[in-house]
Image (tube, rainbow, N blue to C red):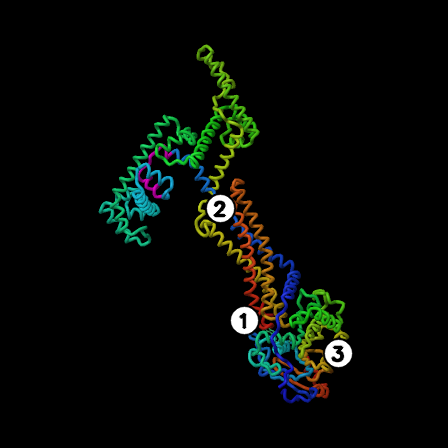
Amino acid sequence: MAENTAPQTTDGEGRVIIRTVGLKKSYIMKDVVTEALRGVNMEIFTGEFISVMGPSGSGKSTFFNMIGALDSPTTGRVFIDEVDVAQLTAEELAYLRCHKIGYIFQSYNLIKYMTALENVTTPMAFGGVQPDQARERGMDLLDLVGLKERWHHRPIEMSGGQQQRVAIARSLANNPSVLLCDEPTANLDLHTGQDILNILRKLNKEKGVTIICATHDHRMMDICDRLMWIRDGQIDRIARRDEVHVEVGGIGGMDE
Amino acid sequence: MKKEINVANQPWLGFSRIIQITVDGIRYRLFRASVTVAVIAVAVAFLMNILSESLIKRSVARDTRDRIHEMRLILDWSSRLTTPGNPESVLREVARSTPGGPIYQEVAGMAGLDEATMTAFHQKCSQGNSYLDFFANLDYAKRRNLIHTATGIGIFRRLQTPNGMEQFTKSLADIHSIRFTTSLDDLNTFLTDWGKLQVQLQAVVAARAKAVAQIRQQLAGKPITDALADATGSFGDTVRQAGFVFDGETVAPLVASQAQAELDVKRLQESMDSNACKQLIAQRANVLPADVNVIMMWKYLGNAKFATRYLERMKQENEKAIAYEQKMKNAPPKAEGETKATIDDTEQGTRLNVAGLVPERLVELAEARDMQASLLRAERLTVGAGLGFMGLGERLAWLLFVSLLVCGIGIANAMLMTVTERFTEIATLKCLGALDGFIMLMFVLESSFLGVVGGVIGAILGALIGLSRMLAAFGLNFAGAIPATDIVVAVFASVAMGMLLAGIAAVLPSFKAARLAPMEAMRIE
Ligand SMILES: Nc1ncnc2c1ncn2[C@@H]1O[C@H](COP(=O)(O)OP(=O)(O)OP(=O)(O)O)[C@@H](O)[C@H]1O
Ligand SMILES: [Mg+2]
């Protein structure tokens, strides 16, 4: 299925940056086995902006955790830049998570006892950036998401949307090559959501950051290169945006 | 193939930044942290309390033993100078004496033994003593199996008979749980020589009896205590002439002063015969004169002002008694009935020996009595100290072990709680590129820090409680026996203990969480 959406869609470069082979994940809780992913084969190319869609509980977040090297698959393999994630040492994994991949979690996962600025600068500190430099860059990032005035606030003192924006700023801390966004606009109003989308698009177009984005937001379809539908832990369909727009009436039922 | 993602090793985070993150975390969870600190403090305080009390008890026990031994010098010498003892007591005494020591020399001198004979004698006595100890420590059933009803040196007599020996060897082979102190061959040689040894012992007893007779002659019916009060003077010489080793420099002055004290105490206690004296105390203690007893008297005499007053009253009574006697002698004898009517109780007085008594002496005696009472109390309270682990006594050592366990489990529980609460945080930090080592270090640092704070609070608290409890139990007389250095070392040890336990308790769960993939850690409840 992945093959028919050819590389030519992606700025001509067409290098595979993330590839999954027969990816399966089942959660075992006592006797109940939940199969969250049932064999996903997927290729994502450098500089691509791809939207992942699917009903709630279809396995989007699970898929993100796998390709972000945050969780180990039950079977199957994940290659990041043609390197098998399972082969990496703990130090290399930490480096990968710190410098190369940015994560925006569905539940933000901010550190509770750190201020907004500290949350943003923590990945930089892990990456070895000097504190002064980290501070400066952290303020720039907060400015980018419109929270410059709130840099000293703790997560508990901020609204859901504001926390989400801090999480976005944090994901950009070390100029990642790949950005994994789990519902980045879910808690934002139309206007702010649009701002965030603009930022993502700009990152994608100007810096060539590969963006993988789980969303229910229809506007995302306007800016992404490809769309991928997941249903019951399996890829339902993958399509280029232009293809989708042609048959726009048909997808209404598919999405959500 | 050119790779955009060049995987490298993640660098280590600066130590100051780790500390900063750790401290931020603690500050944010200040309440939770203070609860943890409190748990650690209580656990360490418990440990430290037991430890400090054990140490104080151990040291007090040592101190008491020495002081009580000294206190009983007068009793020792009173009996030594008046009774010659028997072969068995001589055997034990010689066995316990150190070669060259006073008893050793005294026995050698009195019985006229040369050095070689004395050495052999001493050695034989020690052997015999070890046998007697062995039989004394057996329980009744085993003892009866081995030697029937024989006791003391009667045991040797029984073992010398063929029947007695046969029963002994057979039972010894049957009862596997006991081990004899020496080989049976050694026992046999000892028994062969027993007759000779007995003769030697008898000779010592005879020599002693002679010396005692000499002393008795000198005493001429005077109580021994009276004579011993003069131990530094001529009586000391008499004792030495009789053949006793009685050191004029070290032992005699102690014995003399103790004898004097005993005499003075007796004189003071005789004042309890006087109603007028009793009245003085009764006024103070707010009781009836008839209820005044010796204990009240000593308490009253502990105060210098009262002691002066009391001595004054004693002198008055004595003078009154002398005057009355005089008057009775001069007055013409009266008929029976008449006498009873004219005798006035308040006029009669009581003969009291107040010669040489001064108020300071009264206070001194009262204090010495107090000290003796507290010594005896301390001896009772420290029974068993000196045995077991570190000389702490078996009970205390066991208590210490239990408190260590309680301390360990308390701290481990507190730390486990704080770490497990934070698995989400661990997972998030890992997602942001934290190394496993960083996460562990962060937690170990945090809990060690809490451990140190809790440990210091607990150790000081525990030491203070232990100290005041022990002071209350033993009295201020023993303030000098408090082992200050030991307690300081114990404080440091308990702080280290708290820190170490807290650190270890944090290592295990954080190691478990840090090793997992971030999302797996996030899923741990
Ligand atoms: N920790 C877990 N233990 C057990 N089952 C889980 C766990 N996490 C997810 N699942 C199950 O895996 C399936 C996929 O979950 P996932 O979170 O990937 O869905 P999703 O597509 O992200 O949904 P949403 O749009 O609501 O975020 C669901 O059926 C869910 O019940
Ligand atoms: Mg999800």
Identify the image quadrant of residue B30: bottom right
Q: Which residue is mark 1?
A: A30
Disc 3 residue lies near ligand 2 with CB under 8 A: no
- Tell which quarter ligand 1 is in: bottom right
Q: Is residue A211 left or right of residue B414?
A: right
Which numbered dot is residue A198?
Answer: 3
What residue do we see at 22% from left, 47% from top? Answer: B162
Q: Is residue B85 magenta?
A: yes
Q: Are marks 1 and 2 on the same chain?
A: no
Identify the image quadrant of residue A29: bottom right
Q: Is residue B218 left or right of residue A85?
A: left
Which quarter of the image is occupied by the N terminus of chain B? bottom right
Q: Is residue B419 left or right of residue B105?
A: right
- Residue A63 percent coordinates (x, y): 62, 78
- Residue B393 percent coordinates (x, y): 45, 49
- Circle 1 chain: A
Of circles 1 and 2, which is in front?
2
Q: Amino acid type of disc 1? A: Lys
Q: Amino acid type of disc 2? A: Ser
Which numbered dot is residue A150?
Answer: none
